Image (cartoon, rainbow, N blue to C red):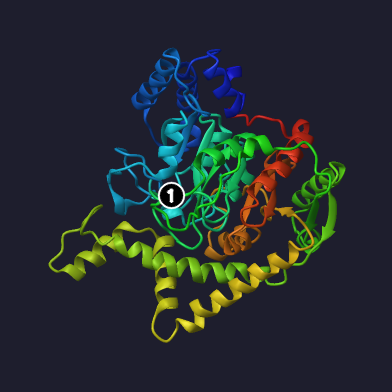
């Protein structure tokens, strides 16, 4: 592998700006790496070869003319295929959208372009972001770059896999209940779910509107901090984004945790069936202590109900959001003798099994006579989960624990829905509470598969979370600095 591909995005952008390399050369290397790895990884649904090189040349020309190209100058970025890129097909990895072309850039894509990033392609996902393994894609299978017999995690599996395979420096995913953090853990990269409202969702195809967030995958915490600085902030097109300052996250990264308190839910580690994961996370917690943090025990008594709450709330909101795919305005349309038959045939053939399952669950939960029993009750328990976090954060500044109960499993290993849903047991509560959270690589299991630590902080404490994660990353760097064989 070319040494230029081993650096992170922050360093790559510096070299482009200072003309130590060119955006075109950097982009060509990434596309060459994708050509090498894609037949085995399958992270991308589409690569924009000509468009990416044209974007890179424009950056180089701007630099040549003495213009400021932006903080992500020349950095190749991949976009999950449920986020709009103008003129490119958005499929959500579903048959029902067919060859639908996005009429505009999502706000996050526009802001990345303004910062000088190069959009190189669209990545695979579980259909409509519903899944934990990327096996629910209707279009292709994505494999884990560390071992192609294993899944990359989901739903943003393609976005995690391309960063791990070094066929992108940064990628965007969406996280509803863990869809950035779980694949980051499985693929050994940093994955970040911002505080709810920190990043605009305009141009993201909605799954569960009270939970969805767009966030980055990257090779380093400082790349995540830079991405969040670029993408974050108020957007008039998304009413959930508040009018509050976006800090200069990269400048706030620290090298120690003196004066910080880190909460740990001991039961998560003591009762973990996979001892390799528990031991790696425990060692990382010890490293936090070595960095000056005080480790305190906290409780999240209602977190055990998170999965039940999530699959009521998310399914109900998905049922509502996916009603727009009616075969009338865009996407595939099956011919039929009546309107209702057209709806049924198109949605019956266009949606995959997992999407249908969640639509039916959500429709039932919202139906007359069941709304209070399911959706209403789930909302009340969601409030209890959020209050548990509020109480815990009175004792600590962030909470550390495992990101997943296990490392990446083999493709086809989890065939029943419940076992798949349990993959997100540690990530879902933070989504329900609207917190910021990330997965940070902290080790490997005996088979050489990555292990991720889950770090969580209060809403809009993104800067504090990233600073702590950066300090831990530097402390652990020597023990986790490996490359997957496929790269």
Q: Quadrant of residue 355?
A: bottom left
Q: Quadrant of the C terminus?
A: top right
Is residue 123 at all visible to an observer of this figure? no
Query: Percent x, y for residue 332?
Result: 24, 53
Query: Percent x, y for residue 431?
Result: 58, 60
In this rendered view, identify the residue nearer to me: 242 or 486: 242
In this rendered view, identify the residue nearer to me: 187 or 468: 468
Q: Dot 1: few (<14), some (14–19), or many (≥20) neighbours within 10 Å?
A: some
Q: Say above or below: 290 vs 179.
A: above
In this rendered view, identify the residue nearer to me: 277 or 474: 474
Query: Percent x, y for residue 227?
Result: 55, 38
Task: Say whether residue 147 is left or right of residue 279.
Answer: left
The residue sitting at 77% across, 61% down in the picture is 265
Q: Quadrant of residue 119?
A: top left
Secondary element at tag 1: loop
Task: Say whether residue 338 is left or right of residue 455.
Answer: left
The residue sitting at 20% across, 70% down in the picture is 340
Is residue 85 at all visible to an observer of this figure? yes
Label 1 belongs to which residue? 235
Query: Percent x, y for residue 162?
Result: 52, 35
Q: Say above or below: 401 vs 112.
A: below
């Amino acid at each position: 592998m070319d040494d230029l591909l081993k650096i992170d995005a922050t360093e790559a952008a510096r070299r482009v700006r200072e003309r130590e390399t060119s955006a075109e050369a950097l982009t060509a290397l990434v596309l060459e790496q994708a050509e090498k790895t894609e037949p085995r990884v399958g992270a991308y649904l589409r690569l924009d070869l000509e468009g990416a090189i044209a974007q890179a040349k424009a950056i180089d020309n701007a630099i040549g003319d003495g213009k400021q190209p932006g903080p992500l100058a020349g950095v190749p970025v991949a976009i999950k295929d449920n986020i709009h890129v103008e003129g490119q097909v958005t499929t959500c990895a579903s048959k029902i959208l067919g060859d639908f072309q996005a009429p505009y850039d999502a706000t996050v894509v526009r802001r990345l372009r303004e910062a000088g990033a190069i959009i190189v392609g669209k990545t695979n996902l579980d259909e409509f972001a519903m899944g934990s393994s990327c096996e629910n894609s209707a279009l292709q299978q994505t494999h884990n770059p560390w071992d192609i017999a294993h899944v990359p995690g989901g739903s943003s599996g393609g976005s995690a896999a391309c960063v791990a395979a070094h066929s992108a420096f940064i990628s965007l995913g969406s996280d509803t209940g863990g869809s950035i953090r779980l694949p980051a853990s499985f693929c050994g990269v940093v994955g970040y779910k911002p505080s709810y409202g920190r990043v605009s969702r305009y141009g993201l195809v909605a799954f569960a509107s009270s939970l969805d967030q767009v966030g980055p995958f990257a090779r380093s915490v400082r790349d995540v901090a830079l991405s969040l600085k670029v993408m974050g902030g108020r957007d008039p097109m998304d009413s959930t984004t508040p009018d509050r300052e976006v800090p200069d996250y990269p400048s706030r990264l620290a090298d120690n945790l003196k004066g910080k308190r880190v909460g740990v839910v001991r039961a998560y580690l003591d009762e973990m069936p996979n001892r390799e994961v528990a031991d790696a996370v425990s060692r990382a917690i010890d490293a936090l202590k070595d960095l000056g943090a005080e480790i305190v025990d906290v409780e999240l008594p209602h977190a055990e109900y998170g999965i039940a709450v999530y699959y009521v709330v998310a399914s109900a909101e998905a049922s509502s959001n996916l009603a727009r795919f009616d075969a009338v305005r865009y996407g595939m349309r099956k011919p039929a003798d009546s309107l209702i038959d057209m709806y049924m045939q198109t949605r019956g053939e266009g949606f995959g099994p997992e999407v249908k399952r969640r639509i039916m669950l959500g429709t039932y939960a919202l139906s007359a006579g069941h709304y209070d029993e399911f959706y209403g009750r789930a909302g009340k328990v969601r409030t209890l989960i959020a209050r548990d976090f509020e109480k815990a954060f009175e004792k600590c500044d962030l909470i550390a624990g495992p990101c997943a109960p296990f490392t990446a499993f083999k493709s086809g290993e989890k065939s029943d829905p419940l076992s798949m849903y349990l993959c997100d047991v540690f990530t879902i509560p933070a989504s329900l509470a609207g917190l910021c959270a990330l997965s940070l690589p902290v080790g490997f299991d005996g088979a050489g598969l990555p292990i991720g630590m889950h770090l969580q902080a209060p809403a809009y404490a993104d800067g504090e979370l990233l600073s702590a994660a950066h300090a831990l990353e530097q402390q652990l760097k020597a023990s986790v600095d490996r490359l997957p064989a496929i790269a």
